[in-house]
Amino acid sequence: MNAARLSLGSLGLCALIASCTPFHRNQVAWIDGSSDAVNGGRSTLNVRWSRTIGEGGAYIPVENASTAFDHVRDRLYVGSSDGQFLALDSRGRRYFEYDPEAGVEAAPAVDTRRGEVYVAAEDGRVHALTFTGEVLWVGSAGGTVRQSPLLEEDVIYIAREDDAVVAMDRTNGEVFWTYRRDGNVEFSVSGHAGLAATDDAIITGFSDGTVVALDRTDGTIRWQRVTAVDVEPEEGTARQFFDVDTTPVLHEGVLYVASFTAGVYALDPASGSVLWREEGFSGVTGIAAHERMLILASALEGVRAYDLRLREVVWQRDNESGAPTQPVVAVPFVLVGETLGALRALRIEGGEEVSRIDTSTGFSAPPLAYRRYGFAMSNGGVLIAFII
């Protein structure tokens, strides 16, 4: 069991600083300093509307939950750290509001075919709703949840913050199985990897630096890859963080993960064998993939594009204000926010910043991109809809 989970603020980079900052009215600004009205739609990120979610107060809340979108029914779902959960349309009109009785720090999971949405609250309860807000069931995953659930035909999988994975019945919320990683970790970085799926396994990373593939049916280990063995012990009192906090990315038959200290790994998804390792990256907390590129977001080194053919970094953007969010590909751009800064649009080819949205409070939750539409939840609880 973890003795302590340290936020990236412990390294001087995290959004938790924002949670104790006096609140100021959020303002949306452009990279050239003009307002949305003055900009007249000439920016890459054109703000369509914004809406405050949550009650606000004297301090700015950190919002970790991204939004989810049902494009079939034009439903946008969003939760907040103060326990609000709303369903809106893409123009910001409210359909319903639901009270999960706890903060929401994970993006909901949406089944567009069935018209269902699953909300995992911070207290571990999972709420299954219809697209009209009717409650199907409420179950318990047994621990804090800050990662989006993974939906399969009959099962919903949950990654808990205490290094556990839970499989629940989608019809009634009963728990099928629970896998708990009992690593002896004295210190770890705040945050946790989400879940990825192959045909026969659920894969995630843990605080002790291990990547594990679990059998879908019973939660037994199919394979595990220990990354901590690749880290040379350092002399002195400096803490080493072995966490694998990146949600695994399966891209063109290869599984990509990153250890906070040991670097980036390309693994065989069937066996966990290491295809290659790039040890020159540290502090990586988010990975996205597009064609031959891996986009790597690091709390220590900023945003990098790694060419998988050349096996080298082809561009890099330093962090400006805090740690970066999970990068999101919205071709021909990659969108990434910073915990104390702006939401930025960077070109996948070349890395140039072409536009930004700055709310003065930063972004901890990754944005959502669907075709030309984008949605981002800022710290302070302002939901912004924009055109890409």
Image (cartoon, rainbow, N blue to C red):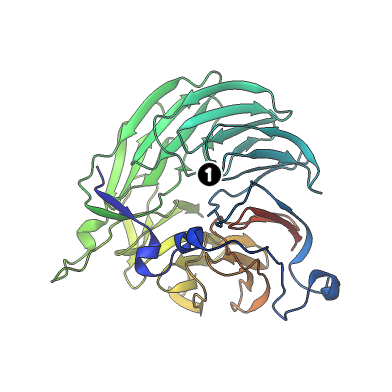
The quadrant in which the C terminus is found is bottom right
From what the image shows, is residue 54 above or below residue 131? below
The residue carrying mark 1 is 106
The N terminus lies in quadrant: top left
Measured as percent of width and height from the top left, residue 2 is found at 26, 46
Near-viewer residue (3 or 304): 3
Q: Is residue 316 left or right of residue 388?
A: left
- x%, y% of residue 27? 70, 67
Quarter where residue 98 is shown: top right
Three-letter code for the amino acid on which mark 1 is drawn: Ala
Horizontal side of 376 relative to 276 (left or right) equals right
Q: Is residue 13 visible?
A: yes
Residue at 72% in and 81% down: 32
Q: Is residue 349 above or below residue 268?
A: below
Q: Tag 1, which secondary structure?
A: loop
Q: Quadrant of residue 276?
A: bottom left
**Residue occupying image coordinates x 49% and y 78%:** 318
| Farthest residue, direction left | 235
Seen in the picture, residue 148 relative to 23 is either above or below; the reply is: above
Task: Specify whether residue 218 is in view.
Answer: no
Side of 5 relative to 83 (left or right)? left
Tell me: residue 302, above or below residue 204. Answer: below
Q: Is residue 321 left or right of residue 181?
A: right
**Is 119 or 216 nearer to us in this picture?**
119
x%, y% of residue 156? Answer: 51, 30
